[in-house]
Amino acid sequence: MTSDHPAPPTTPEQALAIVRSRYARPKLPDGTPAELCVEEFDIGYLVYAVFPPVTDAAGRPQPAPPGGSKIVVAKDTGEAVTVPNYPTEAAIALYRKQRQS
């Protein structure tokens, strides 16, 4: 298949390769690439960056900045789509709902 239509992934590593080929790699504040995690579920793979907790000058935890997204790679087609940066289960539930419409 072409890069526009990748082969459907059968492993988390293949899903991660699809994401890396289509999206910019998020960076940590020091410029190093952020770790990417993959959560497999029945119809896809959820891929997201992991950032260290944010603290203020006194070391107190602060909320994460708003925004961002996660990426789902469909197991049946290899299509990659973004979903809001919701907690894992909520992001997967939203993707399932979008696929049913």
Image (cartoon, helix red, strand yellow):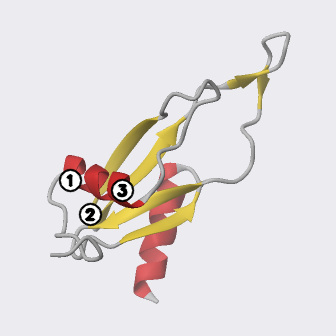
Bin the neighbour count of mark 1 within 10 Å (Cα to Cα): few under 14, some 14-19, many 20 and up.
some
Q: Which mark is residue 32?
A: none
Identity of the amino acid at label 3? Val
Q: Position of residue 17 (x, y in %)?
A: 27, 52
Tell which circle, 3 or 2, labels the residue nearer the N-terminal end.
Answer: 3
Pointer 2 and pointer 1: residues touching (CB < 8 Å)? no
User: Secondary structure beneath disc 1?
Assistant: helix
Q: Gap between marks 1 and 3, in whole Å?
A: 9 Å
User: Secondary structure beneath disc 3?
Assistant: helix
Instruction: From the viewer's side, name the closer residue of 34 and 31.
Output: 31
Instruction: From the viewer's side, name the closer residue of 24 and 69.
Output: 24
Pointer 1 and pointer 3: residues touching (CB < 8 Å)? no
Disc 2 target residue = 42
Tell which circle, 2 or 1, labels the residue nearer the N-terminal end.
Answer: 1
Bin the neighbour count of mark 3 within 10 Å (Cα to Cα): few under 14, some 14-19, many 20 and up.
many
Disc 3 target residue = 19
User: Secondary structure beneath disc 2?
Assistant: loop
Q: How many marks?
A: 3
Disc 1 target residue = 14
Bin the neighbour count of mark 2 within 10 Å (Cα to Cα): few under 14, some 14-19, many 20 and up.
few
